[in-house]
Image (spheres, grey):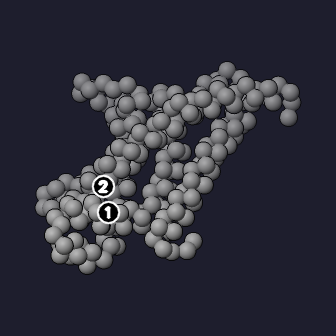
């Protein structure tokens, strides 16, 4: 590796990492938090078997799981202005990632809710709790422990998927790498470098996932 390439990689590292800390991570955190609110509400509507609302929830999940994330980004950012709805790149990305991830997480949480024994719901009724109180105090805590590993995997996947936001001009890590490459034209080295930074973020999240799973296992009285 020649001296010029080494210097390019050293100079570009912070120029790539900084957008990761100021755009990639915030986009992931905000979008996933919103997605969890959507997912819990959607899963509970299905679990409660509310007619009408359940069909609406299934339609939402069907649309967002059945269409590519990139197409959804283009529809919101490039398509909606034709209907008079204009959004800045970052809020548009947050909206799309929230709705897309919410559809996937809703199915994860729904399956976790259905894995809780039916007797738990009946036990809540027996002690005088309402349906919502039983869900909040008994069913959801158990279901979320079951759903924690796949939801953690979804967070890790979202960190990598945020690279698609570069297509709607969000200045995240991949977009920063493209701009640097347009100046120095070292695509192999630069794209490997940004890939390693994504790998670093994913590794940190994987370690946090392992810690969380261990704590939940201890809490539930199980050994890891």
Closer to the eye: label 1 or 2: 1
- Quick one: 135 or 200, which is closer to the camera? 135
Element at label 1: helix
Residue 3 shows up from this direction: yes
The residue located at (52%, 58%) in the rendering is 212
- Residue hosting label 1: 140
Q: Earlier in the sequence, mark 1 or mark 2?
A: 2
Residue 156 image offset from top left, x and y in percent: 52, 50
Q: Is residue 223 above or below residue 132?
A: below
Distance between the alpha carbons at the discs numbered 1 and 2 = 9 Å
- Circle 2 packing at 10 Å, graded few (<14), some (14-19), many (20+), is many
Left or right of 158 on screen, residue 85: left
- Quick one: 20 or 136, which is closer to the camera? 136
Element at label 2: helix
Name of the residue lying farthest toward the front: 127
- Residue hosting label 2: 40
Q: Are marks 1 and 2 in contact (CB under 8 Å)?
A: yes
């Amino acid at each position: 590796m020649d001296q010029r390439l080494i210097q390019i990689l050293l100079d570009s590292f912070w120029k790539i990492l900084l957008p990761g800390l100021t755009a990639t991570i915030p986009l992931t955190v905000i979008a996933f938090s919103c997605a969890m609110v959507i997912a819990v509400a959607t899963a509970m509507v299905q679990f409660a078997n509310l007619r009408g609302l359940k069909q609406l929830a299934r339609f939402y999940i069907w649309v967002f799981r059945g269409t590519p994330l990139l197409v959804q980004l283009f529809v919101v950012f490039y398509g909606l202005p034709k209907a008079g709805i204009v959004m800045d790149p970052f809020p548009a990305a947050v909206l799309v990632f929230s709705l897309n991830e919410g559809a996937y997480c809703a199915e994860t949480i729904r399956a976790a809710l259905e894995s809780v024994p039916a007797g738990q719901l009946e036990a809540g009724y027996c002690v005088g709790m309402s349906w919502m109180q039983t869900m909040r105090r008994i069913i959801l805590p158990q279901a979320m422990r079951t759903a924690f590993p796949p939801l953690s995997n979804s967070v890790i996947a979202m960190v990598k998927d945020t690279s698609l936001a570069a297509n709607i001009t969000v200045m995240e890590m991949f977009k920063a790498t493209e701009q640097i490459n347009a100046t120095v034209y070292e695509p192999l080295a630069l794209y490997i470098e940004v890939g390693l930074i994504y790998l670093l973020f994913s590794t940190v999240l994987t370690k946090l996932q392992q810690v969380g799973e261990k704590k939940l296992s201890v809490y539930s009285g199980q050994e890891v």
